[in-house]
Amino acid sequence: MMPDMRRRRALAAMAGTPLLLLVAACDSSRNGAPNAKDGKTPFNLGIVSSVGQSTAIIADKKGFFEKNGLRARVFYFGSGADVITGYLSGGLDAIDVGTLSAYLLWSRKQLPEPILVYNSAQIQGVVVRTAANIKSHKDLVGKKVAVPLGSIDVLSLQLTLKEHGVDPASVQLVNMQNPDMLSALSQGVVDAAATFEPTLSRIVKELGAQVQVLTRYDGKDEDARSCPSCRLFPARVMTFVSPQWADEHPEAVKSIVLSFWQAGKWIHDNPADAARTIAETLKFKESEVAEGLKYIGWNNPLLTPQIIDQMKLEIEYLNGKGEGPGSLDINPLFERGMRIQDQLKQQYGNLLPPSG
């Protein structure tokens, strides 16, 4: 079997995507030219199946990609770690993930370039089974805690444990996606779950006295010990492109950014319709998506010097823990994205949602 085919089979299996569709998508986006039939540029986008990736979903489902001359294939993955594997396979031209996933890629000397960012007022917490008798973080020693491995949630949990004097290695981490945590807690498969809204509130509402909230961080200073990583790593979803693909398709990269801007404004202006579309796509409850959208700030999706400086601090912290990309000058990685956004602001600045 040829190496390219092996990569496609692996990516198809991870994404839950029919193999023939993925092979066709990979073949069409590798040819370096717009589709001869419709003149649209094909590209493969990998995202996490999460409300946090709402702009990507809406850009696809509401036709913004197509309207801007793109033939998008969006592949949904269970976690940021799976998206990384998909990107490393060579089957994805762009990814929409949290910054921690990008740091992991940069650590492997893979350097996708950021082209836009959305900040999210993500509320994180740890919920525990009442029967497990967990009264403090020290009681998590030896317990099973559900968390999506390879996600920012893992780092958040590890830092929180250290903040409370607990060795993260003493806690059993169980790889689990957020939608599965409620049943796992109910059935006693795990003793606790590290998650975020709206999953946190859903678990508390549906399980009632069966669970208790150990910690919940909503950005207030007095809650800072509950989630130290929230101070160090603000919830941030960014879109990255392969530099090789971007060099071949400079106008298409600009169209991707424009499509995301349009999708963000559409969500801002049509929250009920957005919740319905996203719920149908992700097979989530519409009420849960609507609740989740409340925690995502559709602020200006602009790359700024402040964001670059914050990411440098985050990388410095990770390097100190032996988990960062090392001595990497990230300034050049932002040049394309900042140049594109400056060009688009001149023509489409009215698309940017209001701050706040």
Image (tube, helix red, strand yellow):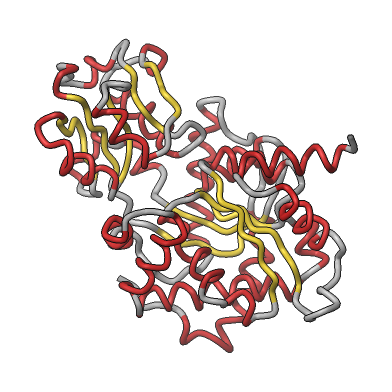
Question: Which quadrant, please, contains the C terminus?
Answer: bottom left
In the image, 19 versus 312, the foreground residue is 19
Residue 80 is drawn in which quadrant? Answer: top right
For residue 29, above or below residue 261: above
Residue at position x 37%, y 57% in the image: 120
Q: In the shown orientation, is residue 221 left or right of residue 8?
A: left
In the image, 157 versus 91, the foreground residue is 91
**Spot occupied by residue 328 in the image (x, y as percentages of width and height):** 66, 42
Question: Which quadrant, please, contains the N terminus?
Answer: top right
Residue at position x 76%, y 72% in the image: 41
For residue 113, above or below residue 202: below
Can residue 304 be seen in this snapshot?
A: no
Can residue 149 be seen in this snapshot?
A: yes
In the image, 160 versus 65, the foreground residue is 65
Residue at position x 51%, y 75% in the image: 62
**Spot occupied by residue 354 in the image (x, y as percentages of width and height):** 36, 78
For residue 139, above or below residue 238: above
For residue 230, above or below residue 35: above
Residue at position x 48%, y 50% in the image: 49
Instruction: Tell me how many marks there are.
Output: 0
**Spot occupied by residue 174 in the image (x, y as percentages of width and height):** 41, 23
Q: In the shown orientation, is residue 228 left or right of residue 37?
A: left
**Spot occupied by residue 242 in the image (x, y as percentages of width and height):** 72, 55
Instruction: Tell which residue pokes out farthest to the right in this image.
Output: 2
